[in-house]
Image (tube, rainbow, N blue to C red):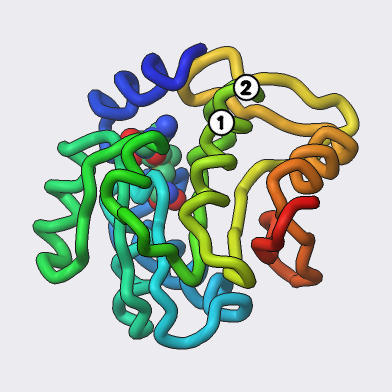
Amino acid sequence: MTAEAVIRAWDHAEPEAIHPTRHVSEDAYWESGKAQADMLASVIPDGAKVLDFGCGDGRVAVPMAGLGYDVTAIDASQRMLDRLTERAPDVTTVQADADGIAAHLGRRRMDAVYALAVLIHHNWADCLHIIGRLRAATKLGGILVLDWPVSETPEEADSWIGITTWARQQQDAICAELGLEPVESELPWGVYRAIKTN
Ligand SMILES: C[S@@+](CC[C@H](N)C(=O)[O-])C[C@H]1O[C@@H](n2cnc3c(N)ncnc32)[C@H](O)[C@@H]1O
């Protein structure tokens, strides 16, 4: 599927599609976001300027703001952003895809960028493109947290809600090309520091 098709599908998705905990209860859904914000806080310095790419309705962006981070929440879907603003009017939202990030930031760069449950729904080529844009939005030495799972049998998502997985060698090659240095962490996602490429 193309990124446009994935974005179109999410723009019409029911709120329940965002995370399995929403089938349990709204409380469970927001608690899952708080737990993941706490996990991000173990690798992102206090008070950092962070970009939540594909923020949805703010499951993680809202608790990140609650922890004192300066959050910019980006999503291609204005419907998602409207729901986020309803819950947390003070969080900065930007309606954009990965190509729109640069226009919003201008010369500014973020201390940290994370994308949770976003890349998993895109094909390899579109992921590569998006990760390049996320890396470009991050200052040198900044942190990127990418949810792009490794598998022994990597495959591309075959629907907007499907899951794309990666070979470790594919990820290593992308990191070398884009200037992403792996950071040791306990997190279930890839954590990287933005470094210069040769
Ligand atoms: C599964 S939801 C995850 C939301 C949030 N990150 C979370 O973990 O709760 C995926 C979100 O990413 C957004 N999205 C997917 N692909 C995108 C893209 N290429 N550019 C911008 N937003 C995108 C969708 O609109 C949707 O809100």
Above/below status of 71 relative to 12 = below
Q: Where is residue 1 drawn, in percent x and y?
A: 51, 12
Query: Which element type, helix, strand or loop, lies under badge 1?
Result: helix
Which residue is painted at 77% across and 33% down in the image?
166
Above/below status of 65 relative to 25 = below
Mark 2 packing: few (<14 Cα in 10 Å), some, or many (20+)? few
Q: Would residue 188 appear left or right of 11 to someone viewing this image?
A: right
Which residue is painted at 74% across and 21% down in the image?
155
Q: Which residue carries the number 1 mark?
A: 129
Instruction: Please report contact status of discs 1 and 2: CB closer than 8 Å, yes or no.
Output: yes
Which residue is painted at 14% across and 70% down in the image?
90
Q: Which residue carries the number 2 mark?
A: 125
Q: Where is residue 171 drawn, in percent x and y?
A: 79, 40
Amino acid residing under circle 1: His
> Marks 1/2: CA distance?
6 Å
Residue situated in front as seen by the camera: 80 or 107: 107
**In terms of image quadrants, where is residue 89?**
bottom left
Residue situated in front as seen by the camera: 85 or 193: 193
**In terms of image quadrants, where is residue 131?**
top right
Amino acid residing under circle 2: Ala
Above/below status of 35 relative to 26 = below
